[in-house]
Amino acid sequence: MTQNTSLSYRDAGVDIDAGDALVDRIKPLAKKTLRDGVLGGIGGFGALFEVPKRYKEPVLVSGTDGVGTKLRLAFELNRHDTVGQDLVAMSVNDILVLGAESLFFLDYFACGKLDVDTAASVVGGIAKGCELAGCALIGGETAEMPGMYPDGEYDLAGFAVGVVEKSKAIDGKTIAAGDVVLGLASSGAHSNGYSLVRKIIERSQPDMNAKFDGERTLADVVMAPTRIYVKPVLALLEKLTVKGMAHITGGGLLENVPRVLPENTVAELQKAAWPRPKLFDWMQAEGNVAENEMHRVFNCGIGLVVVVAAADAEAAMAELQAQGETVYRIGQIRARSGDEAQTLVV
């Protein structure tokens, strides 16, 4: 190619036509997530959303996250249809713990060379996550950046915006000794601790396609998408007072539950109160991971913690079960002694 040859964006590694094709594939997916408040669709320079008028003192709540190194397994296993739900779940579950209803979600997909089928599969997962959360996928960004990512790889980030009535925002300040801790079952490791998950897989060299848990393979289990708790918990909040919630993400049970506790309290969790999924037992054995490390890194089967008054515990469990959740009474709140850890698994 001579210096006089006319160069195009495609010559530089960016395929505008592929980007346009992806937008065409995304539009019907996004359309399925539309809800009240959306004033503009995919394709504009910005997305317009009107806060529902039923709120008297609306407070906006936002959260942002990625999928982490679970993406590395997605590349290796060529499974791209679930990580989009992971992306949505990490943000909508985070803002849920403040009592917020998810309103809308935006995503950022970056790659070296755009593969329309792969990108559409990822965005399909994002759209499914938004449907499960009841929020609208109203925009995003697809960035094709030659030389920035290896072939076949991409990165994901996103953020959710929700709303809560100012008087109903949940901050954990009323949590007191005697309150009950409920745990909602996770769907697996969700999207946390995957650097350790991958290290364990690297060490044990398992057959990822062999049956592992019932009919599910190990690949199925490690790629299971993060459970989205939004609709069941919002239904609970319509009926009962919830004092505090914690989304069990990076930091596991030991570091996430204290984020919602008053300094003079401790959440004492009973390890025998819930069944630990096979994945976590396998990882602990294959990686020779200490028990405390397991609870500091992984959710160990509990994806969301809900704290209620003892008098409301049975009703809260019944409501969550009616909404399709698997719920366990996993512990209680007690007074803290000195500077002891605020969450104990005993």
Image (tube, rainbow, N blue to C red):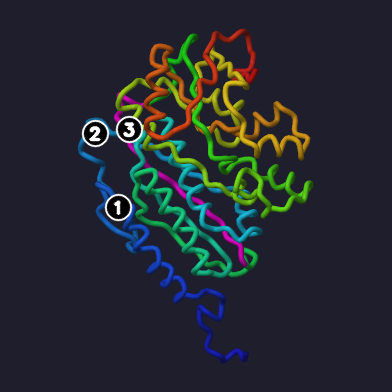
The one nearer the camera, 324 or 176, is 324
Q: Which residue is mark 1?
A: 34
- The circle on residue 55 is 2
Q: Which residue is mark 3?
A: 164
- In the rendered image of this protein, does residue 20 appear above or below residue 200? below
Viewport quadrant of the C terminus: top right
Badge 1 density bin: few <14, some 14–19, many ≥20, Cα 10 Å: many
Quarter assignment of residue 244: top left
Write the start and end of the magenta stretch as one range. 152-169
The one nearer the camera, 196 or 325, is 325
Q: Determine whether label 3 and label 2 are within 8 Å by CB.
A: no
Q: Can you tell which of label 3 and label 1 is closer to the viewer?
A: 1
Disc count in the image? 3
Q: Residue at x 52, y 79 (%)?
A: 10
Q: Amino acid at mark 3?
A: Val
Q: Can you tell which of label 2 and label 1 is closer to the viewer?
A: 1
Report x, y in % for residue 2. 62, 91
Report x, y in % for residue 252. 60, 32
Q: Secondary structure at mark 3?
A: strand
Mark nearer the N terminus (2 vs 1):
1
Q: Amino acid at mark 1?
A: Leu
Q: Amino acid at mark 2?
A: Tyr
- The circle on residue 281 is none
